[in-house]
Amino acid sequence: MKKRYLIVLLVLILAVASMPVFAADKGTLTIENATIGKIYSAYKIFDVTNSGDAYAYTIADSSQWYQEITNDPDPPFLLEKIETSTGKYNVSIPDENLAFNWLQSKADAIRNQSPAITPDAELTAESTRLEFTELDHGYYFITSELGSIVTISNFSYNIQIIDKNQEPVLLSKEVSHSCEQNSWADFCSAAIGDILNFRIQAFVPKYHKDKRVYRYTFTDEMDAGLTY
């Protein structure tokens, strides 16, 4: 015999914008669906300049990311030296999918401190909405303790992204005779014919990878010590 518990989630559809971030001077990057208590880090890969709808990426040879790119035998970015500037390069991105995968691998490596790259900004989420304000305009990617967030397609002055790296977590399973506030416990004694109440508590994210979640199903199997 199995008992099924359903939790229906009404998911607010949020507008998603993407990196790079750029503005006249500074920009704001907002993360929705952030996990409270987790650290989020912003890394600026390239500088960016824009005029109207046109934009250009550059990187200096003093950047820690310059070393990562030039030391890679097959990087997803092409660098061309700017002859009128000392130690600066124009950057082009031939394939955004390759760039995405490259940044994903770097995010995984950074979490293991290899390479040990310092973030340009770092915040701990105190609510499900997290804002990086006063960011220098540039080409960024964001990592969290749960995984990486990388978006590299659209452009705006202030942008919003959604953290989709969360995983569901079962927090507790409890039983009670009466359902009164202080009666819930991990276990209880009961006689044949008693009516018991069960409840579960869980963290259920709004997204599973890149898909929005509308329903979770919990399946409870009978313990081996029970017969029926």
Image: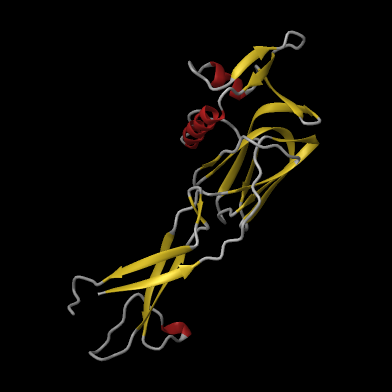
Report the number of numbered marks.
Answer: 0
Q: Is residue 124 above or below residue 111?
A: below
Q: Nearer the viewer, residue 4 or 142?
A: 4
Q: In the rendered image, which quarter contains the C terminus?
A: bottom left
In the rendering, at what x and y percent does residue 53 appear? 77, 31
Q: Is residue 220 left or right of residue 139?
A: left
x and y, in percent, of residue 195 in the image: 32, 88
Q: Is residue 168 left or right of residue 100?
A: left
Pick the front one: 68 or 116: 68
User: Could you tell me which residue is drawn at 48 percent across and 61 percent down?
Assistant: 204
Nearest the eye: 2 or 188: 2
Q: Position of residue 20 (x, y in %)?
A: 67, 34
Residue furthest out toward the bottom: 193
Residue at 25 percent of width and 91 percent of height: 193
Residue occupying the point 43% across, 60% down: 169
The answer to whether residue 33 is above or below residue 8 is above
Q: Residue most toward the top?
A: 83
Where is residue 223? Give x, y as percent.
23, 71
Q: Splitting the image into 4 quarters, where does residue 69 fall?
A: top right
Q: Which image quadrant: the N terminus?
A: bottom left
Applied colour scheme: secondary structure
133 sits to left or right of 1: right
Residue drawn 46% across the image and 64% down it: 215
Q: Which quadrant holds residue 185?
A: bottom left
Res 89 → quadrant: top right
